[in-house]
Image: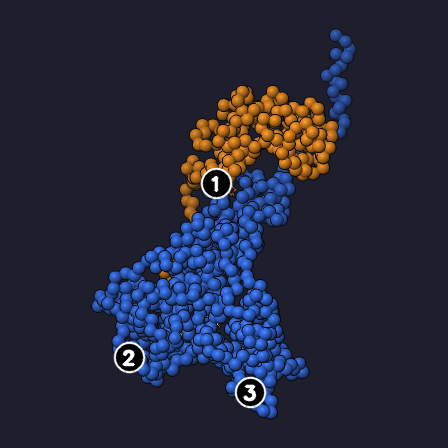
Amino acid sequence: MKDLTDRLGTLFSLGDITEKRDDLAFVSVAPDLLRAVITHLRDVEGFTHLVLLTAVDWIEGGQFQLTYLVHNRTRARDIGLRVFIDREEATMAGIHDLWPTAATYQRELKEMFGIDFPGSPRIDEEFILEGWTDIPPYRRDFDTKKYAEETYFHRPGRETFDPATHMKDKLYPGEAS
Amino acid sequence: MTVQDVLSPFTAWKNLFRDPVTVRDPLTERPGAARYRGFHKNDVAECIGCGTCEAICQNAAIDMVPVDGIETKEGDSGLRPQIDYGRCCWCALCVDVCMTGSLTMSNEYTWIDSDPDAFRFVPGVDHKSWDDAELGYHRPDGHRLTPPERIVMREMDPERRIGNFEEIVDGYSVEEARAEAERCVACGLCVATCPAHMSIPDYIATIREGDYEAGLKLLYETNPFSQVCGRVCTHKCETVCAVHHEGDPIAIRWLKRHITDQVDRDRYVDIIGRPAGETGHKVAVVGAGPAGLTAAFDLARMGHAVTVFEARKHAGGMTRYGIPEYRLPYDALDADVDVIRAMGVDIKCDTPIGDKVTMTGLEKDFDTVLVAIGLHLGRSTRIPGSDHPKVAKAVDLLRAITDGETIDVPKTAVVIGGGNVAMDIARSLARLQKQIHGEVGMTVTALEDFSHFLADPEEVKESFEEGIEIFDARGPREVLVDEVGNVTGLKTWKVVSIFDDKGRFAPTYDEGDERIHVGTMVIEAIGQAADVALLGEALTEKLEWNRGRITVDADGRTSEPWLWAAGDCVNGPDVVHAVADGHRVAASMDAVLKAKELS
Ligand SMILES: Cc1cc2nc3c(=O)[nH]c(=O)nc-3n(C[C@H](O)[C@H](O)[C@H](O)COP(=O)(O)OP(=O)(O)OC[C@H]3O[C@@H](n4cnc5c(N)ncnc54)[C@H](O)[C@@H]3O)c2cc1C
Ligand code: SF4
Ligand code: SF4
């Protein structure tokens, strides 16, 4: 993959490069370069297939990571582009004009992380969550357990025991503390 | 219309006799992929009921429930996870976090039943067809959600520590302690094993939150010897830590120490809280060791007037006069004793009970009396030569070192014994030898072989590092004395066995394997007995005894209604057991004193 990343490096200013395997590498690029790099990969380097577009919430660093994975069918190799965007102002230029399928990914990311892709088809329509009122559920500050407790009832008859309390009851019931 | 058109429906018929290109009924068997996350399996013999799977499940799908035939015992709550598949989303977080690796998933995912409650069961207990399935999701090797390795405790290296009595262990920094505290899964299995039932997960949580004052308050609710125990506790709690099944147990003892180190000692009493109003009851305690002082601490906080009588110059008992300073600096012990004094406990040192002040006198002057005199008489091997003046008892020498007495430090000495006391005296004398003679000349001979050694492995390791020679499986036969009457060494035989087939102590030796260990002093460190002379003849007669020990019930009450006994002299064997004893006695005395008020 070094041939490819070297070529890319002469054309664009790249961030961290991670060679995972002979046929897989990841490269970080600035948000405003993403469209240029990915268009180049598609049209010049033969990465014609968009494998996926996904996100990670780096809540500690106040950023979302977007990962665009594209595939070159003839040379059977993949490259992932990593883009870090601000978590508060979570907006990114769409690539649905390059790959129509990207619109679906972008709509999912809007719903699950709250990342906006202005102009992307049906971006504001509900995707799989119906009537969702909470913060987007894949944000790490979403408290899954609390939501589950509040939203879904327990089957009647459920009971749980705290290990330490149970051990006290069984092993040293009379004693203080 | 052509002939072709007429025949075309029939041309399809020619395929009738070909092999089909599709597979016939592919749906009768639908195995999940090899790592499919299907119904759970649990190896309930490995599972310890820690409930970490329940804590991590984001869908609240797991309940911890008692199960027939699985006993609650130290290190195992006896509970097992029950999963509600109405809520489970098959994420496998529970499998990834499982502390023992007992919880896995089969690749079975099809199951039909008209009863919704059938989908709530205890894997491994309620048997299912997939219990023996080999395929399915298991936590991959090396994939851990909790770091398995303990944060290393920094220690002074052997060259620097051997010539002095400075504390060896550094203590954690705030960052190190937090990282260690983050490894705790807060299951609380350890609480039952701690004799004082300290609220371990709760105080560890205060380290994560950085709220040391809250941590200190929790510590002193159950243990007034927290600074002492944070350094020298035998930490049995760590042997049942859930993390130890697949990693190093949490350094519970060092975390306790860390909390006590972080809080300014001037703040202690305010944080711990002042005693209740006076009740007017008077309690006497004999012995200012951990047992006596813990009882005194509790009773004073309940509002009783407590006087402690101590024979020695200073309070602390064996924590001061036994445990060497390099493991427990005196200022840490003093700080704990100061807290106890601040609760209003009157500690009278240099006041042995027996001659001037008698037990009869205490019985008269106080409502109740506690005897917590520890074990201070060193036992002897009684081998030939053991009555020589150059044969000493470990506890006597350790006391002399604490009191700062000048000891005639021999260039070479031999210790008999393989327990922690033997290591303490060997390492203390080694330090004095280094200071006075410039080199270490200590030999330890133990009955047990290394695979059954009594002393802690760290003690053995650190002794070796300090240049002490240890011979295992050696039975002492004779203290050798030359013609002018000087001790020259110890003769030992190889130990063949220590106990007979009934489990009684009856060592046998290989006489052909004899060794002479050179030394001009021999030290016996084979155990201690209580000096009960203080009781006097009449009380000794009245009391019930069991093999040389005063008989007490679970609350520490003797057969005399005014008298309790606690600590090493009746139970033992360590500081935290003495502390636990002290609490039990205080609660029991308080109940008796309150009952008196009512009558
Ligand atoms: C060398 C050594 C090392 C040890 N190391 C450890 C360790 O690392 N960790 C651990 O947990 N435990 C350790 N122990 C054990 C621990 O010190 C004891 O279990 C604990 O101190 C027992 O407390 P206690 O209050 O019952 O008795 P003690 O601590 O023995 O206190 C009894 C007190 O009673 C006083 N006394 C006795 N007779 C009279 C009298 N007639 N009148 C007035 N006062 C009297 C004594 O002077 C003493 O102060 C060690 C013991 C020894 C000997
Ligand atoms: S698989 Fe996930 S949802 Fe199901 S019980 Fe385990 S942790 Fe809970
Ligand atoms: S985490 Fe593992 S060991 Fe602990 S209760 Fe759950 S299944 Fe048992």
The amino acid pointed to by label 1 is Asn
Sequence order check: which comes first, mark 1 or mark 3? Answer: 1
Q: Is residue B488 visible?
A: yes
On the same chain, marks 1 and 2? The answer is: yes
Residue B458: x and y in percent read: 56, 65
Q: CA distance from mark 1 to mark 2?
A: 66 Å
The amino acid pointed to by label 2 is Gly
Write down the colour of chain A.
Answer: orange
Nearest the viewer among B42 and B315 is B315
- Residue B367 located left or right of residue A106: left
Spot the blue chain and give its letter. Answer: B
Question: In this rendering, is residue B423 above or below B175?
Answer: below
Nearest the viewer among B197 and B396 is B396
Q: CB of residue at label 1: within 8 Å of ligand 2?
A: yes
Nearest the viewer among A65 and B166 is B166
The residue wearing badge 3 is B385
Secondary structure of the residue carrying tag 1 is loop
Q: Residue furthest top?
A: B1
- In the image, what residue occupies the spot 54% across and 74% down? B432
Secondary structure of the residue carrying tag 3 is loop
Sequence order check: which comes first, mark 1 or mark 2? Answer: 1
Chain designation of label 3: B
Nearest the viewer among A105 and B288 is B288
> What's the mark number on residue A134?
none
Residue A62: x and y in percent read: 51, 35
On the same chain, marks 2 and 3? The answer is: yes
Q: CA distance from mark 2 to mark 3?
A: 42 Å
The residue wearing badge 2 is B361
Q: Residue furthest bottom?
A: B483
Quadrant in which the N terminus of chain B is drawn: top right
